[in-house]
Each structure stands twice: as structure tokens, then as C-alpha cells.
Image: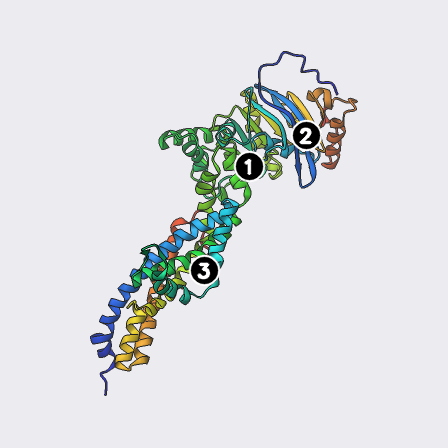
Amino acid sequence: MADSRTSVSSPAPILEARKLFKTLGGNRVLDAVSFVLPRGQVKVLIGPSGAGKSTLLQCLNFLIPPDSGQILLDGHEISGGNKKELCALRQQVGMIFQDFNLFDHLSALDNVRVALVKVKGMGKLEATERAVAELKRVGLADKCTLYPANLSGGQKQRVAIARALAMDPKVMLLDEPTSALDPELIGEVLAVIRDLAQGGMTMILATHQISFSASLADEFIFMERGSIVEQGSPAELLGRGSGSRTQAFCAKISELTGEAPDAGGTGECRV
Amino acid sequence: MSTPYLEFLHAELAPALMDGLWTSVLVIVPSAALGAAIGILAGVLRVYGHPALRRVVNGYVSLFRGTPLVVQVFFWYFALPYIRFGDFSIVLDPIGAAVLSFGLCSGAYQSEYIRGGLLSIKRGQIRAALALGMTTRQAVLSIVLPQAFRRALPGCGNEIIYLIKYSSLASIITVNELTGTATTIAKNTWRNIEVFCTVGVYYLVLVSVAAWLLRRAEDALSVPGFERPSN
């Protein structure tokens, strides 16, 4: 499918991936994946499980180093071998995981504070103020002293978001941030993500929340078997009769969850 | 023929055992500290160290877990002085040799508990730390190890309890700790039953105190999600 957006003169890219390849256990998980992420844009990764969405996100900050290809942050190529450069890259690229990965032995406040002190070298007082401010931003000012074991899934994910935001990232990678949550807890996390997007944060979001992400995304990227199969604006890919793979995939999700596609008559899939 | 037990205890046995007790403590406390330090270092290296280093540390653990402690104690006390580098050789005094052998042996076991603790921490913890820009060393030291240590503490405490009892082996290289002192008194007085039962009680008290301190340590480190299981 043609990408109508590339012709528009877009702002300078923050993150760019060029021909990323990755083979894990004999399977090609990423096959020549390239994309450009301009400042302030939200790109949504969708596709069946095993498509390589999670691997792609983890390659972008070298948690899984790609076998070949280039990753550019603000126009500078990152070399995976240089530890100092890697730490600098990771500070600027916030990551949110499906299973939260809060530090289990630290309170919500310390979860946010620990990297400010250890990585940014902030003083304790300054770090505390910043951490409290970030927790407030995700609506958890009153939960500072609680430990992960005492937080709900939705609260844990919001602490994880506060922890990433405190590092002042230029871009956020969100790897299925609501997939491990009970249905009634998804809303509070999505609300925070929506606030972020509306605040102008550059993001890549892997998700199965199609209708939610369609309302935020500048572009959908549909992945299958390690490659980008389609990319384009949500309206274009999800439109009734677009005949796109994205649309077919999304209709299948709707069917499985027992909801009628095109509910509301907007021409979008609802999930 | 002999004085009553209480009189014997009061006049002869207790004062001597009190000296022995201090000597025991002088052996146990540094050995336990050395063992814990070696155990944490070796445990971390066995999980996160460079592969070559990992092999070396694994070798240390097999050697010290695989040979009798008595042999190790004899080695450090009797054999080490004969190993010469030019004119230089190391001669340890009995307490030094005991602390070294107990510390090294205990460290080998402690490393196994720490290793188990480290492996029980989910990989996502380290990934999240790296994703925030921490170095691997920072991630291990400030995120994984504090959690692993809490998980390993009951096992490590158990090893310290063992250590208290195998400190009695110091008596075979002439350290006059509890067991050494008791043996001497028993030989001189022929009151074997009273002496060895009494020294047994001393060890029981030592172990109880250690167990209480370990419980306090577990409570002090307890946070939600890492509580001490209630018995």
C-alpha cells in the first residue's frame, strides 16, 4: 500500500531504522525492517503474535542487538559495541514493557528515582522532587510509598511510564503496554498514553487496542513474519473496503472478541 | 570422689569455657564475614562474570565443596608453610588458618545460595534497568543483587549456623576454642559426660543467638513481595 504521508515535508526524524535483520534460534525474526520516525509522530505497530513487533522494539534500544542494519537517533548512527553510547541512547529512548518490570524491591517512588540518581547523577533531593512530579503526572501521587506487590496492574504500568518519563526521553517505545492487564484496568493506562501523545511525545506503540490507537496514530505499521507488510494512516488502512491486510487482521480480532466490525459506522474496526 | 556438678561447673568448667567461647567467637565472626563476602562475589561472578572467570570460580567451588574440611584445615595450617616462592612462604597462626579455611569453604557454599537467588530474579528486571541507561554492573548491583540477596538470606543463614558448628574443627590445629578447651578439661578430669554435655549447651545457645540475629536481619530487609514466610 502506498504511503501518502511521506510526500508531506515532515520534521526531522528522531529515530530511524535502516534494514534491520535479526535471526533468533534459526528463525528470521526481523527481515529488512526500515522506517523513519519524525519528531512528535505516533506510529502504531500491529500484527499477529510472532510477527516481530516486540523484537523490533527491543532492537531499537539494543536490548536485543540487531544482526545487521543501522539505527540512527537524531541523525547519529548508534554503534551497538560502544557501551557509553548505548547507555546514552537508552536514556533518550524510554521503554515500556508488557509485564511492567517494575523493580520489585523498591517503592513506587524509588522505582522512578533510582535511575535519576544512578544514571543521571542527580542529587537525592532533586531526584525525589522529580519522581514525585512524574508520579503525580500519571495520577499516583498518593501511592509513592507502596511497593509493586501492593499495586494493581494498571498502577504498576503507570509507575513504569513515570519511571521512563523521568529520564526525559526523546522517544518512547511501548511494547503492548496493556496486554497483561485485566480489562477494567486498561482504561487508566490508555488515558496516560493518550495524554502523552497529545502532549507531543514521539512514540512507537505495539498494541492490539486497534480503535484506541487509530485515534492517536499518525501511521499504522502492519508487520507479519518479520517484515513490514503495510504502512499508512489508520483511515487509509482501516477504511471500509480498503482490502488491506491490516483491515482483515483487525476484523479478525473484532470477530474473536465478539464485537461487530465497523461499529459506530466510522469505517474503523472496533476492538 | 569428685565434686558435685554445679560446683565443678562454677569453679572450673564455666570459666574455662568462657575463654573458649570468646576464642570461638573470634573464629566464627570473621569466618562468617569472609564467607559471606566471598559467597556474594563468587555468586555474582558465576552468573554474570566473563565466561573464563566463571570457569575459574566454578573450579573454586568444586574444589572447596568437594574436599573434606579437615583436609582443607590441615592444608592451610601444615602444608602452606612448605610452599615457597623463593625465600618467601606463608605461615599462618592457628586462628588465622582456621578463619581462612572456614571462610573459603563457607564462601563456596554461600555462592551457591546467592547464585540460586540471582537466577530466581526474572530477566525483565535487568532489561528494565538497562533500558533506563544503567550499565550491566549498575543493574546487577542495585537491582538484581538486592532482590537475590533477600531470596538467598534463609539459605545463607543456614550456612552460618553450619559454620558455628564446624568451627569446632579449629581444635584439631590447636585453637583452644570451645571444643578444644572442653577436650582438655575432659582429659584432665575424666568427667566426659558433664563436660561434653555442657559444651553442647554452649553451642546450642550460640546457634540460637545466631538464628535470632538472622531472623532480625530478614525482618529488617523485608519489603512487600519479599517477606519472611511466617512459620
Residue at numbered disc 3: B64
Q: Nearer the viewer, mark 1 or mark 2?
A: 2
The number of discs equals: 3
Q: Can you tell which quarter of the image residue B138 is in?
A: top left
Counting from the top left corner in percent of width and height, residue B22 is at 26, 63
Query: Which callout, 1 or 2, points at the residue further toward the start of the chain?
Result: 2
Disc 2 chain ID: A
Counting from the top left corner in percent of width and height, residue A63 is at 56, 35
| Residue type, label 1 | Gly
- Callout 1 crowding tier (Cα within 10 Å): few <14, some 14–19, many ≥20: many
Mark pair 1, 2: CA separation: 22 Å
Q: Nearer the viewer, residue B89 or A179?
A: B89
Residue at numbered disc 1: A154
Q: Which of marks 3 and 2 is in front?
A: 3
Q: Measuring 66% from the left and 31% from the top, which residue is drawn there?
A: A21
Mark pair 3, 2: CA separation: 54 Å
What is the residue that sits farthest to the left in this orientation?
B11
Counting from the top left corner in percent of width and height, residue B32 is at 36, 57
Query: Is the residue A268 above or below the residue B50 in the image?
Result: above
| Residue type, label 2 | Ile
